[in-house]
Amino acid sequence: MASIEELKEVRLKKLSLLKDKGINAYPAKVNRTHTLKEIVESFSDLEKKGDMVRISGRIMSIRGQGAILFVDLYDGTERFQIVLKEDSNIIYSNSDNKSDDIKDAFELFKETVDIGDFIELGGKLFITKRGQESLEVFDWRILTKSILPIPDEHYGLKDDDERYRKRYLDILMNPEEKEMFIKKSKFWRVMRDFMEGKGFMEVHTPTLETTTGGAEAEPFVTHHNDLDLDVFLRISVGELWQKRLMSAGFSKTYEIGRAYRNEGTSPNHLQEFTNMEFYWAYADYKDGMNLVKDMYREIAQKVFDTTKFEARGHSFDLADDWKEIDYVEEIKKQTKINVLDTNKEGSEIKEFLEKNNVKSDAKTFERLADSLWKYCRKSIAGPAFIVGYPDFIQPLAKRNSENNKTVEQFQVLIGGAEIGKGYSELNDPEDQRDRFEHQQKLREKGDKEAMMPDYEFLDMLEHGMPPTCGFGAGERLFSFLVDKPIRETTLFPLMKPKD
């Protein structure tokens, strides 16, 4: 088998042959009259008319030899067969000046064209003796000469590292991958339409911040040259900014945008991802739960035509009743540990985690409790809302009036994981100040994920913010509904450069 370099050398010689004949192998103008999808959908009518049509696309296969060639063409909309016959007196359409056309271009095609090349062809539609809708070619020209071969259609790209680095080839050779990303585009469109239909206004908030807020995560740090200031890439989609808009008098806002977290990679986590967050004035977490349930069901039905899914070894139906599961009680049921009434050194939790072979590098009680909950949630298929979170888990949520050790927070749980989080937003400035100060103490203990205090945000709360519900979800939800790791559902995941 020839090496890549040897194959490249052969193709470079073919490119040189085209140039010797005065042919531009990379022209800008394309003269097609129809996409291949239009050809397929209107084949009968176009064939009856008998008019010349011009099509363009990438060569995916070449079959035959001698006096007839069968070529499969793909233009991103559809795939279609073209037929070149030696006795059709094919010409090479070199330019709009017909005097430049090259006669007897059948042999030129055989000598210079490879699988992977982009070409333009003119001809008439017909049906072969085997009943295959096809185009008989009377003229052709090169649009792009490929120097490297594309993968074999049968084998494709098997190595994950190679697939992610050359996603363009992975998608080209794998129709299911392309279909998934088309669905992902629709996923965001349906979510946006849902929010707009409920009266929410789309906004855009800063991605560079002097303090990170809205989540507990380690941020990426960069430098702003003009202000000579270190800044952070945001870790949430504008939570503290959108809540400022509630104070400003907007009642319903949402944003779909990128967030960045300098953390590890897992099937459910990436360092760069797209999320949607909404904020709803004069609403609480119960209102948010009802809205979110409707949104998830609408996304499922409109994007996937079903509410039934299998993900991470679980089966669930979003049309079912959504149970409310208490965070503290569920941990107690599974582990016998009451996280609201255990020693703050976390020895009881550590002992349980070690006994059950759960690895945790937690340095604080808050992170230990989170590790314990992650162990417990894996057995729950959902759909469910997890409620009753301790106040130390969420520093931005309003306290529960019936138990001030817990907050009015909910998380959507499907497939054993949390896929969306919301809460009644904390708008008591003194309580918020106390929790910011507690988060700062955690940072001083080495917890890089603890939240940074934002004292300008406290100024806003002192001016007053109405009761508000906020919620966020996004790429992780899509990855669960297609039951693939989130890295697989990302068009171009970050890759470490090759040496």
Image (cartoon, helix red, strand yellow):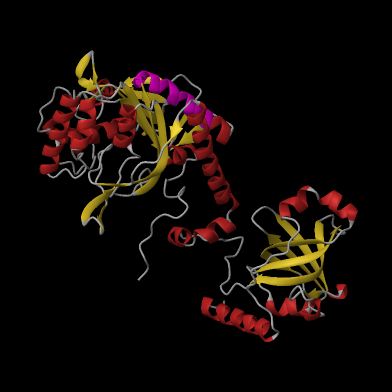
Image vertical order of residue 129 relative to residue 105, above or below: above
* Residue 111, image quadrant: bottom right
Image vertical order of residue 472 relative to residue 399, above or below: below
Q: Position of residue 380 (x, y in %)?
A: 37, 28
> In the image, what residue occupies the spot 69% across and 53% down?
78
Identify which residue, 172 or 29, lies in the foreground: 29
Q: Main secondary structure of the magenta part?
A: helix
Residue 361 part of the magenta-drawn span: no
* Residue 397, image quadrant: top left
Q: How many numbered marks does the figure carry?
A: 0
Q: Position of residue 259 (x, y in %)?
A: 35, 45
Image vertical order of residue 338 relative to residue 352, above or below: above
> In the image, what residue occupies the spot 74% across and 79% down?
108
> In the image, what residue occupies the spot 58% across and 54% down?
174
Q: Is residue 102 left or right of residue 446?
A: right
Q: Position of residue 57 (x, y in %)?
A: 68, 62
Q: Is residue 392 left or right of residue 278?
A: left
- Asked whether the viewer can see residue 20, the reply is yes
Q: Which residues are magenta?
A: 282-299
Identify which residue, 493 or 361, lies in the foreground: 493
Image vertical order of residue 143 relative to residue 434, above or below: below
Identify which residue, 239 or 110, lies in the foreground: 239
Q: Is residue 23 left or right of residue 252?
A: right
Quadrant containing the N terminus is bottom right
Quadrant containing the C terminus is bottom left
* Residue 353, image quadrant: top left
Residue 288 part of the magenta-drawn span: yes
